[in-house]
Image (tube, rainbow, N blue to C red):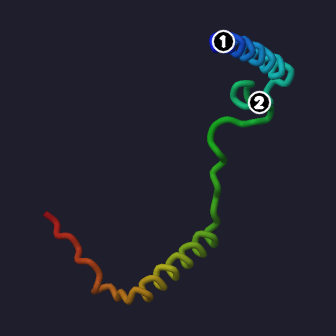
């Protein structure tokens, strides 16, 4: 009985697969990679973002302030940190 159920399930899978193919053929380019690329979609790299000098400066100042706060919280004055490694 299990064998007949398996045969029926496989037949149903084939029917559904054929139906899916028909639907995808009716709407080309709408189902991701299998249906092809969507119309108007670009391939390749994303456009490079450009940051103004003022934006870079603002980010730099914010990072320096954050690092200074963290050092102040830890009480590190520069001399109490880990020793530098000696070169061989």
SS class of the residue under badge 2? loop
On-image quarter of the C terminus: bottom left
At 74% from the left and 24% from the top, the residue drawn is: 35
Q: Nearer the viewer, residue 29 or 7?
A: 7
* Circle nearer the N terminus (1, 2): 1
Reading the image, the residue beneath label 1 is: 1
**Label 1 Cα crowd, 10 Å radius (few <14 / some 14-19 / many 20+):** few
Secondary element under disc 1, as helix, strand or loop, is loop
Task: Kindly identify the residue that appears in the image at 81 percent across and 24 percent down.
Answer: 28
**Dividing the picture into quarters, in which one does residue 11 lie?**
top right
Residue 41 percent across, percent down from the top left = 75, 36
Residue shown at the point (46%, 82%) measured from the top left: 70
Are the residues flagged by discs 1 and 2 in contact, CB closer than 8 Å?
A: no
In front of the other: 72 or 19:
19
Furthest residue in direction right, as rendered: 26
Label 1 vs label 2: CA separation? 38 Å
Q: Quick check: 58 left or right of 37?
A: left
| Direction front: furthest residue | 1
- Percent position (x, y) of residue 9? 70, 16
- According to the image, label 2 marks what residue? 31
């Amino acid at each position: 009985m299990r064998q007949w159920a398996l045969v029926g399930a496989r037949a149903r899978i084939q029917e559904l697969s054929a139906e899916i193919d028909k639907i995808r053929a009716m709407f080309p380019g709408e189902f991701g990679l299998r249906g092809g690329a969507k119309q108007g979609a670009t391939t390749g790299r994303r456009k490079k973002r450009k940051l103004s000098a003022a934006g870079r400066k603002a980010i730099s100042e914010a990072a320096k302030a954050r690092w200074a706060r963290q050092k102040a919280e830890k009480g590190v004055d520069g001399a109490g940190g880990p020793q530098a490694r000696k070169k061989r």
